[in-house]
Image (cartoon, rainbow, N blue to C red):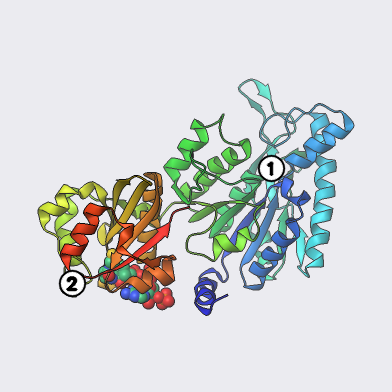
Amino acid sequence: MRFEDLRGILRYVPQFRDRIFVIALDGALMKQTNFANLLQDIAVLQSLKIEVVLVFGARSQITELAQQRGIATSSVDGMGRTDAASMDLAIEAITRQTSELVADLTALDLSVVVSNALGVHPAGVIDGVDYEFTGRIENVDENALRVMLKADIMPVLMPLGYDGRGTTLRLNSDEVAVEVALALKAAKVIFVSESGLTDENGQRLAQISIADAKEMAKGKAGELDINVLSKLRQGAFACQEGVPRVHIVDGTQEEVLLAELFSNEGVGTMIHGDQYQQIRKARSTDVPALLSMMQQSVEEAALVPRTRSQMQQRISDFYVLDLDGNPVGCIAVHVFETEAGKLAELASLCVRRSHKNQGHGQKLVAFAEEAARQRGCDRIFALSTQAFRFFEEKMGYTVTTPDVMTPERRATYDKSGRNSKVLVKTLR
Ligand SMILES: CC(C)(COP(=O)(O)OP(=O)(O)OC[C@H]1O[C@@H](n2cnc3c(N)ncnc32)[C@H](O)[C@@H]1OP(=O)(O)O)[C@@H](O)C(=O)NCCC(=O)NCCS
């Protein structure tokens, strides 16, 4: 590993210290060889003073047990009706899982407590159907969980609840994770799933807004794994109610947890409720403010001068980073059709001087890359006279030759005489 990479990683450590992360593991992952590494990564987070609450699901284990016993189940994920036979299977499977999980965590020297901090009641009758042993979370004993976290003890929450009358109820683990995160005002919910989230071309969706997550959760019911649908729905709800970041990562990949949390670009999908939402499409009325923001960089020859009408003409390519209603950064994505496919140019990247070094430049670039991906581009290039190191070191671009451009774009490049460095990146 290069020292620059290490520096990049260590940058996150103070940001995350003493923050609460709720990590929800799909039960199916527990049967995989990679699971030991996943737990090891959770132990690393704990060692960095991140306060971890662990939640796990049991769908896969209950399904397997039902098959072994030849018992028909009413529902295995805690979302539908749980009849008495399914409840018996759930208790048996989850008890075994809990024991195995605690054994594995103990082997990593972690102090854990299996907690009954959820106040639950039966879900009752919904649309005329009695949900029997399916539970609904009424409240979370926030204080009990905080006491454990402050003592460096990791609370482990099963997808089961107890209603105070001696009844055990089946819960959905995604819902448990979100309710706990909301009660504890967690910084993140991380769904470590059996699969990741991709678009129709099989490309990873790096960031999605709350609205997109909600839309996907209802629109693609036939296409997306039921598991991921539940995470999209619960994740959107969590963000909407105030959890700043929700991540969905494919737990079958190696080192997925650390890669998602400690790299700029991540490896999973992030549902965001705040700052990213503030990056929006530019409007004609933004042009004066954007020109004035770019003026200093133009004077320093870092940016090409643009007239008001040039900008107006291409306004649909521009994005603005808005903080409290003020534009503090901008970026543009121009798309070229080439024989080898669509190619994007990242241009007009600028962050207001007063807001530099707060991560906005990197966010704008990541956002532009995602916009380019969504417009079908598989490569993106940028021209820069003074920020080429920023592109190389922070955003993973490499310096290339002007041949990467289309002939027309190359001609304007040559004509400008600016001799900018040309940087390129493949958009996976
Ligand atoms: C380049 C620019 C967009 C970076 O914005 P920013 O919001 O300050 O960047 P971030 O906060 O995301 O990142 C800051 C990091 O990038 C580094 N960085 C910023 N500008 C850099 C540059 N020109 N060269 C090398 N590194 C640079 C900082 O040193 C800092 O590194 P650190 O985290 O290791 O301390 C901004 O400086 C700018 O507007 N520059 C003028 C316009 C320009 O050159 N645009 C590019 C042409 S397309």
Which residue occupies the foreground of this view, 149 or 12? 12
Q: Which residue is mark 2?
A: 296
Residue 195 coordinates in the image, percent (x, y): 62, 45
As helix, strand or loop, the secondary structure at mark 2 comes to helix
Question: Which image quadrant for residue 71?
Answer: top right
Which circle, 2 or 1, is nearer the viewer? 2
Callout 1 secondary element: strand
The amino acid marked with disc number 2 is Gln
When the figure is inspected, residue 205 is found, relative to residue 413, above or below; the finding is above
User: How busy is the neighbourhood of tag 2: few (under 14 within 10 Å), some, or many (20 plus)?
Assistant: some
Question: Label 1, on which residue?
Answer: 120
Quadrant of the image containing the N terminus? bottom right
Tell me the quadrant of ligand 1: bottom left
Q: Residue at x 44, y 54 (%)?
A: 427
Structural distance between the alpha carbons of marks 2 and 1: 59 Å
- Look at 61% across and 58% down and name the residue there: 256
